Each structure stands twice: as structure tokens, then as C-alpha cells.
Amino acid sequence: MVLALPLSYFALSHVFATVRFHVDRDSVTASGDRIFYAWTWTFAGRFGPRIRVEGISRLRLRDGVVADHRDYFDVLGSLLGALPRIQAAHMAFSRMIG
């Protein structure tokens, strides 16, 4: 079987080769044909802070196979929490624009 992967996948795989990352499964809940999966993704590059992103995945099954998959997470909030100087600048800018 040959997988046709977009070029961006290979670019990201190079980036992740220099990054330590880990995904923790926080909880899984199933109801009917839906599965909700809470997770925490922690990663750190060779330089810079450790960043923690919390999220939820929603999966919908059809005939026992995943028919729909959505992820919900707040990357900006996670980045701002890990980078206090950027967080302060973001908050000042937000106050300026109202």
C-alpha cells in the first residue's frame, strides 16, 4: 500500500523530529454513535518554553468506522500562557482596540 502524503506532512515531520511532544488521554466518553476524547498535548522545542495545549476530539461513527472527526482547542491561549511577554503585549493590544 502506498500512501500519498502532501509535501506539508514531510515539512512538519522534520519540525517534529526536533521537538519533544507527548499526548495524554485525559478522558473518553461514548454516547450512541459519538465519542468525545479529551486530551492534552505537551511539546517543547530545543529552545523555548514547554507548551501545553488542552483539547477535545469529537468522533462520529458510521457502521463502526469513524465517519467524522473534529478537534477543538485553543492554540492562542496556550501559546500566550507559555510566553508571558507576548501575552502582555496581546492583552495591551486587546485593550486598545476595545
Image (cartoon, grey):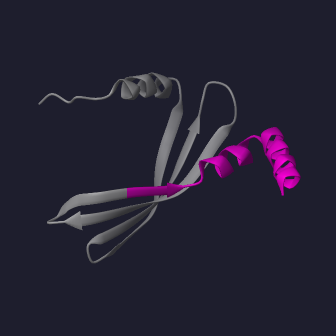
Q: Residue at x 40, y 27 (%)?
A: 8
Camera-nearest residue between 90 and 24: 90
Number of marks present in the image shown: 0
Q: Residue at x 88, y 51 (%)?
A: 96
Q: Is residue 25 left or right of residue 49?
A: left
Please report the bounds of the magenta region as a residue range. 70-98
Residue farthest along the front direction in this orientation: 97
Quadrant containing the N terminus is: top left
- Is residue 28 shown in magenta? no
Residue farthest along the left direction in this orientation: 1
Position above or below: 19 against 70 = above
Q: Residue at x 83, y 52 (%)?
A: 97
- Pinpoint residue 72: horizontal percent, then vertical percent: 49, 58
**Magenta region, mostly helix, strand or loop?**
helix
Q: Residue at x 44, y 28 (%)?
A: 12
Position above or below: 48 against 39 = above
Quadrant containing the C terminus is: bottom right
Q: Is residue 20 left or right of residue 79?
A: left
Which quarter of the figure has residue 87? top right
- Pinpoint residue 68: horizontal percent, then vertical percent: 29, 59
- Pinpoint residue 63: horizontal percent, then vertical percent: 14, 66
